[in-house]
């Protein structure tokens, strides 16, 4: 097993490897692969094949600068979506606080859970609203 790992390491030296865009492409490939089993026709089959080819091309490419620029464009395009998912994930882990949006300025306000009905003052606009925690 050690020899195989060494060979693979030598082969991948100077090549781009896997990044977030490749992970996204492989997710699309998996989804289209499952859909190709249930939907008649060859559309999802070809999406699967093209996705795999593109992913392997990016992974084994020696043009690291271009692949890095592609990944940066992908990250910039999906920054808002990834940020909102990250926010949702951290809020679901926070068991001691509730999150509300101010009705006037849409600022998110964090308040402690289990306090009953409370009057919340927005730190941004000073508006007050009543919510149950």
Image: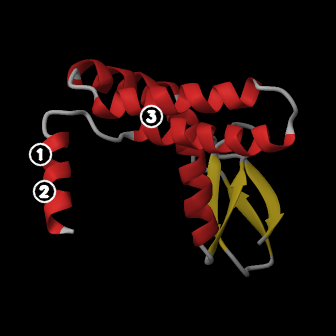
Task: In the rendered view, tell whether residue 83 sits above or below residue 91.
Answer: above
Q: Residue at x 13, y 56 (%)?
A: 6
Q: Residues within 10 Å of mark 3 (few under 14, many from 20)?
A: some
Point out the frontmost of discs 3 and 1.
Answer: 1
Front-most of residues 115 and 27: 27
Count of numbered labels shown in the rendering: 3
Residue holding disc 3: 21
Distance between the alpha carbons at the discs numbered 2 and 1: 6 Å
Instruction: Point out residue 33 in the picture as x, y percentages from the top left corner.
Output: 68, 41
Residue 94 image-quadrant placement:
bottom right
- Tell me whether the residue at label 2 lies in contact with that at label 1, contact meaning CB atoms closer than 8 angstroms: yes
Element class at badge 2: helix
| Circle 3 SS class | helix
- Labels 3 & 1 near each other (Cβ < 8 A): no
Q: Is residue 63 left or right of residue 91?
A: left
Looking at the image, residue 71 lies above or below residue 26: above
Q: Residue at x 36, y 40 (%)?
A: 19
What is the quadrant of residue 17 in the picture?
top left
User: Closer to the camera: disc 2 or disc 3?
Assistant: 2
Q: Is residue 106 visible?
A: no
Q: Which residue is mark 2?
A: 6
Q: Secondary structure at mark 1?
A: helix
Q: Which mark is residue 10?
A: 1
């Amino acid at each position: 097993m050690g020899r195989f790992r060494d060979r693979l390491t030598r082969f991948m030296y100077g090549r781009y490897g896997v990044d977030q865009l490749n992970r996204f492409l492989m997710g699309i490939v998996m989804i289209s692969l499952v859909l190709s089993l249930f939907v008649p026709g060859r559309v999802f089959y070809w999406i699967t094949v093209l996705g795999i080819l593109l992913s392997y091309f990016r992974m084994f490419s020696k043009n690291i600068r271009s692949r890095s620029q592609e990944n940066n464009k992908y990250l910039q395009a999906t920054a808002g979506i990834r940020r909102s998912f990250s926010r949702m994930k951290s809020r679901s882990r926070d068991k001691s606080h509730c999150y509300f949006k101010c009705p006037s300025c849409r600022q998110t306000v964090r308040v402690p859970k289990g306090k009953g009905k409370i009057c919340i003052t927005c730190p941004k606009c000073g508006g007050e609203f009543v919510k149950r925690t």
